[in-house]
Amino acid sequence: MTDAGGKRGRTGSGPLTASSSRDSNREPSATNVEDNWPEGVPVATGELEVIEIWLRTLLDELFGGDDA
């Protein structure tokens, strides 16, 4: 479909994808992951408390905590 300016566009509301049938037979390329985080990542006390509470609740549900 072309708009009034002659530019090509697409119709529909679905997501755009970059795959095609010719790509389906190709081996996936290796992904290079770089870790550029500092050696020590600062965590606030409040953040740590929230994580500990969430993990405690989850582990109690899985393994039966003191209330079980």
Image (cartoon, rainbow, N blue to C red):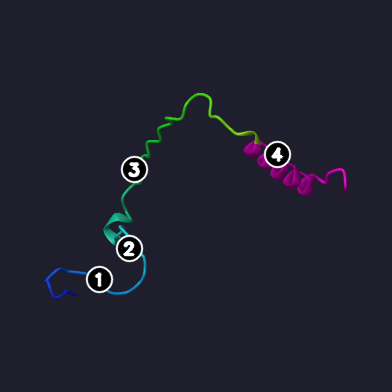
Q: Residue furthest left?
A: 6
Residue range highlighted in magenta: 46-68
Q: Earlier in the sequence, mark 3 or mark 1?
A: 1
- Identified by mark 4, the residue type is Glu
Q: Nearer the viewer, residue 42 or 38?
A: 42
Q: CA distance from mark 4 to mark 1?
A: 48 Å
Q: Label 2, on which residue?
A: 16
Q: Residues within 10 Å of mark 4 (few under 14, many from 20)?
A: few
Q: Residue at 17% x, 69% y: name it.
A: 8
Quadrant placement of the N terminus: bottom left
Q: Label 3, on which residue?
A: 29
Q: Earlier in the sequence, mark 2 or mark 1?
A: 1
**SS type, badge 1:** loop
Mark 4 or mark 3, whichever is nearer to me:
4
Q: Position of residue 38 (x, y in %)?
A: 47, 26
Q: Residues within 10 Å of mark 3 (few under 14, many from 20)?
A: few
Quarter assignment of residue 12: bottom left
The reply to whether callout 4 and callout 3 are in contact (CB within 8 Å) is no
Left or right, 19 with respect to 58, comes to: left
Q: Nearer the viewer, residue 36 or 33?
A: 36
Q: Label 4, on which residue?
A: 52
Left or right, 25 with respect to 39, comes to: left
Q: CA distance from mark 3 to mark 2?
A: 21 Å
The reply to whether callout 2 and callout 1 are in contact (CB within 8 Å) is yes
Q: Is residue 16 one of those drawn in magenta?
A: no
